[in-house]
Every structure is written in C-alpha cells, then in structure tokens.
Amino acid sequence: MVEILTASGFSLGGGLRDLALSRMQDAMLAQIEKETAVNTDKYQAKYEEYQAAAQTSRVVSARLSLVANTIQQNLDHITTIKDNLFDMKVAVETAATTTDMDYIRQVFDSAMTEVNRAADALPKVSNLIGNVGKTTWNTPEISYQTDDIGTRIDITGEYLGSDFYIEDSSGNVWVPDWSIRAMERFTGIGEYSSDTKVDSAYYTFDGNGINLNSLSGSAIDFTVFPDVASETATYTGTLYKGGLEVMPSWMYSDFATEADRTTATDDVDTARDVVNRQEAILKSELAKIQGYENAAKQTVEQYNELTYKAYEEGYIAQYEGQVEMQNRYQAMIINLQATAASQGNYTSLFRGAIRGMGKLTGSLLNQLV
C-alpha cells in the first residue's frame, strides 16, 4: 500500500526518500570523483612536463659547473707555469753576471721541471694544457652542452709543458726524464720502458752527463759523459720539440755565451707569450661557461615556478569544481524539499474533499492515494 505524503515528507514515504537522497549523494560523489580525475590528469601532465624540463636544465647546470671547475683548475696550473717561466727568465739574465753557473743551471732546469709537472698534473680527460702523447704532444678536447636543447661547444687545449726527443743516426731515441733531469736512451719511438732501454745509464743535465756540441735547426750533435774519457761518445741526430719548446740548460750550452743566453731568453719569452694567450682563451671560455650555467639555473627556477603555478591552478580548479558540485547538490535537495512541501499541501486539500464523500468512496480513494 502506498503511503500518503505528509507536510514534512514525500508521498513515497521516509524510506524511499532516504533512498533517493542516498542515490543522489552517490551520483554526486561519483561525478566529483570523475571531474577531479579529469583535473588531476590535466594538471598532472603539466607538472610532469615542467619537472622533466627543470631536471634537464638542472643536469645541464651541474655539468657546466663541472666544466667550469675543470677550466679553473687548468688556469690555476697555468699560474704555476707562468711563475716558473718568470724564474727561468731571471736565471738566464743572472747568468750574464754570475760565476756560479751550476746554481743557474739548477734553477733553470728545476723551474722547467715544475712547468712540466704543472702542465701534466690534471687527469688527461680534463687536462687542456697537458701532454697526451709523448711523441705527438697532443692535448684533449673538452665538449660540453650549453642548454636544454643539446647545443654543444668544444674547447681545444694546448700543451703548455715543454718536451723533446732526439733520434740519433743509429735509430735510437734519446728522451728526457725531467723528474731527475737526465736523458735516457731507448731502441725506438713509442713506449719507453726498461725493456726498450739501450743501456742503464742516465745522462744528466748537470754538465757531467751530456753536452751540446752544435744545434742547427733540428740537426743536433752532442757528447755524453764528457768528463769520463773511457766512456765519452759523440752522437748526431734529429731534434723533435713539442709544447713550449724550451730546452734544458745543456742545450743552451749552460748559458756560456751571450748568444746562448739570447737564444734561451727568446725561447722563454716566446713560451710566456703562448701561455698568456692560452690563459686568455681559457678565461674567456670560463666566462662563457659561467654564463651558460647561470642561464640554466634561471631556467630551472622558471620551470619550478611554472610547476608551482600548475599545482596552484590544479588545486583551485579542483576546489571550485567541488564547490560547484556541492552547490548543485544543495540546489537539488532544496528542490526536492520544495516538491515534498507542495505534495503535502496538495494532500491536505485532497483529504478535505474526501471527508465529504461517502465512506466507501473515501475508503477507495484513501487506498489509491
């Protein structure tokens, strides 16, 4: 039997009313979840896009920072090279007014050793001033990415040490060991080890191990063990130079004459010019790298701001959507309550008319209503 709606309820009864409200709530929640998911997907795509772009620029910035540190390390070693070249220049100038040539020779060769040590101090992969090949004197290149679209720049180094070898008429190769300031003799160009040494001797730069007889262009004539008559030997060969091309003191005849000192001074001055030029190049590269690094950091900040803005927009859109759905839900409740009130008024009027009818008719209508 269908219940009659009272002034405060539905004609379908309180149970059906509650069921209708429950279904409305479920439908509304489902709609809210659906629209929330749409907004979430929409703004999640933005978050991921901006964060991926920020990460790319972050990686670029980090790598540029490493390159900048590498360049700075090279520049620090260049400072050491410049200081030692200056000491060598002073030593040559002093040679004109001193009688202690052993001291001058020692200062000059020791400073040259420090030049080579500074040039070769860094790892080969990041050394722009070092000696990669013993007989080629090549230097590596550093390649770096400047932005988030893959633009790359290469930096080519220049060997700022000084090295050489002599290939004599017998095909043997004489190579300097700067750490002990002496020459060693090997069977050929290439890997130098104890297995390829011609003898176990070390021909020192101090005037007792090796002396220059003549040098014209690349043609060289020299004598070893000049103070040991039984072992003295003279060799001719071809001189090959690399890097700054400043030679040890014995190849300037220990600065014995003004011509020797002039040759040594000219070589040192030329080397200083080369070092100054390379220093200027690397300083310019460092400034550019730091500019690229700052630009990459700014790009990261911009994408972080866009990410925050996307989060904010997503939250606002989600909140406004939920408020709209709640308002719609409240409007439906109000309409439903208004409908229920109208039905209650109609039923009250209808009951008054029923009282004037016959009991049988009234009973039937009561059952139908």
Image (cartoon, grey):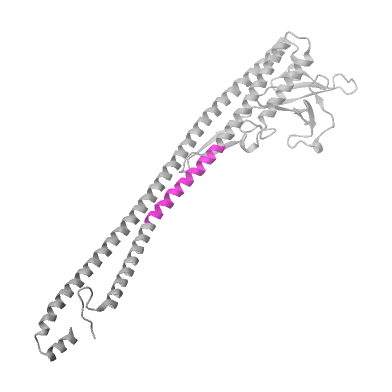
> Where is 333 relative to 164, above or below?
below
Is residue 269 rendered to the left or right of residue 351? right
Q: Residue 132: horizontal and vertical position, in percent?
A: 66, 35
| Quarter of the rendering containing residue 339 | bottom left
Seen from this angle, which residue lies furthest left? 356
The picture quadrant where one finds residue 283 is: top right
The reply to whether the magenta stretch includes residue 59 is yes
In the displayed structure, 90 sits above or below 15; it is: above
Name the residue nearer the viewer: 104 or 256.
Answer: 104
Residue 204: where, in percent of width, then height?
A: 80, 24
Q: Hey, which residue is sitting farthest right in the picture?
A: 230
Q: Where residue 344 sits: x, y (%)?
A: 18, 75
Picture residue at 17% right of the left edge, 86% below the top: 366
- Name the one closer to the observer, 147 or 321: 321
Residue that appears at 49% across and 43% down: 58
Q: Residue at x 27, y 75 (%)?
A: 17
In the rendered image, which quarter contains the C terminus? Answer: bottom left
Left or right: 348 with respect to 183? Answer: left
In the picture, measured across the screen, residue 240 lies left or right of residue 38, that is right
Can residue 253 be seen here? The reply is no
